[in-house]
Amino acid sequence: MPRLVRAHLFIEGLVQGVFFRAYTKEVARENNVNGFVRNLPDGRVEAVLEGEEENVAKVIEFCKKGPPGAIVTNLEIIWEEYKGEFNNFKILY
């Protein structure tokens, strides 16, 4: 049985204004991962990913480099207890 996980990401670098959120949403939906992504006032992008461990790992791999034009300098991953609180993946504003 697949293991359900929750990863809380903080992505640093040139990650705002390069469609990072839109691409992350697309990759998450393609991999059946729920949660959200949003820009933070300090220039970072925050994301919470919930789903099967293998699928969440694919979204994390994407976030390590981001879309064309993005420059990821640091990716912090905080593993949290799976809550199942999301029924889709959305961009928060």
Image (cartoon, rainbow, N blue to C red):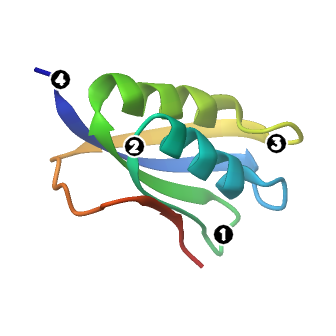
Residue wearing tag 1: 42
Determine whether, in the image, residue 14 is placed left or right of residue 55.
right
Q: Report the disc number at residue 70.
A: 3
Residue placed at 31% from the left, 61% from the top? 87
Q: Nearer the viewer, mark 1 or mark 2?
A: 2
**Element class at badge 2:** loop
Q: Nearer the viewer, mark 4 or mark 1?
A: 4
Mark 3 to mark 1 CA distance (whole Å): 16 Å
Q: Quadrant of the C terminus?
A: bottom right
Q: Quadrant of the N terminus?
A: top left
Point out residue 33 in the picture as x, y percentages from the top left corner. 39, 43
- For this rendering, which residue is in front, 87 or 4? 87
Q: Are marks 4 and 1 in contact (CB under 8 Å)?
A: no
**Element class at badge 3:** loop
Residue wearing tag 4: 2
Residue placed at 19% from the left, 35% from the top? 4
Q: Report the disc number at residue 83.
A: none
Q: Tag 4 or tag 3, which sits nearer the N-term?
A: 4
Residue wearing tag 2: 33
Q: Amino acid at mark 4?
A: Pro
Q: Are marks 4 and 2 in contact (CB under 8 Å)?
A: no
Mark 2 to mark 3 CA distance (whole Å): 22 Å
Mark 1 to mark 2 CA distance (whole Å): 26 Å
Point out residue 41 in the picture as x, y percentages from the top left corner. 65, 75
Determine whether, in the image, residue 64 is placed left or right of residue 34.
right
Which quadrant would residue 6 be assigned to in this image?
top left
Q: Tag 1 or tag 4, which sits nearer the N-term?
A: 4
Q: Amino acid at mark 1?
A: Asp
